[in-house]
Amino acid sequence: MQHKIATKIVGFFSQRHLIEKDNEDWCVYFVETRIFSYAALLLIFFLLLPIASPIEIVVLLSSVLLIRRRSGGYHCKTEQGCFFFSLFIVALGLILAHFLEENYAIQFVLLLFSVCGIFTGPVNQPELHLSGEEYRENTRRLRVMTVLLACIAVIMVLMQMNFASYCVTGLLIAAISVVAGKFVQNRRYSQCS
């Protein structure tokens, strides 16, 4: 179904000569992945409403997604696996954030751990075909985003805002994903050699 929708969207732009014919296949793939990502994100949001408020879900998901966009990290083998794993991890993150709401000292420690974990990234994913310069620029942007989000989280913690724990937990999830992605990547390369 998403392939059919993606093909129609790309065909619409191709007929208006906004996409070149030799780029159509890549564009269809890109649109398919975006459709799945956004639909999965909306579904995760609505499935988690019984255990958290909308603002708590948005703060946590935003923290994770802003970092994951640049960091890479652990990836499941299938879209369905990705969806269920993400749902499970975000639900666990919301539960953890709820228990951390009044524990500001623990939030600071987790924030420090998270920043250190994210700074080990990004995970260099060969399938992205990044040049050395592109990889360095991606690393720089990842670190700037991490520092910015960490500063926001510190301000929230210092102001003892209840949502601070959701921002910190989002960063923690992203950090664990980066470290897991590095571990899996290292295991893959060690098995090949």
Image (spheres, helix red, strand yellow):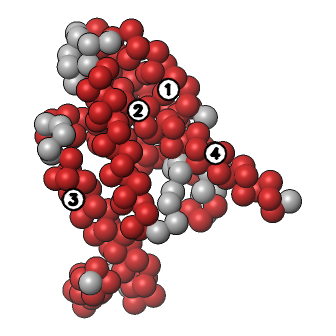
- Snapshot quadrant of residue 41: bottom left
Mark nearer the viewer, 3 or 4: 3
Q: Earlier in the sequence, mark 4 or mark 2?
A: 2
As drawn, the label of residue 43 is 3
Q: Position of residue 97 (x, y in %)?
A: 30, 28
Residue ID at (41%, 14%): 106
As drawn, the label of residue 169 is none
Measure the alpha-carbon separation of dots 2 and 1. 8 Å
Residue on which the image places disc 1? 115
Compared to 181, does 128 lie above or below? below
Q: Earlier in the sequence, mark 2 or mark 1?
A: 1
Hey, what amino acid is under mark 4?
Lys
Q: Earlier in the sequence, mark 3 or mark 4?
A: 3
Residue on which the image places disc 4? 182
Compared to 123, does 23 lie above or below? below
Badge 1 density bin: few <14, some 14–19, many ≥20, Cα 10 Å: many
Q: Earlier in the sequence, mark 1 or mark 4?
A: 1
Measure the alpha-carbon separation of dots 3 and 2. 21 Å
As drawn, the label of residue 171 is 2
Mark nearer the viewer, 3 or 2: 3
Mark nearer the viewer, 1 or 3: 3
- Snapshot quadrant of residue 192: bottom right
Hey, what amino acid is under mark 1?
Val
Q: Earlier in the sequence, mark 1 or mark 3?
A: 3
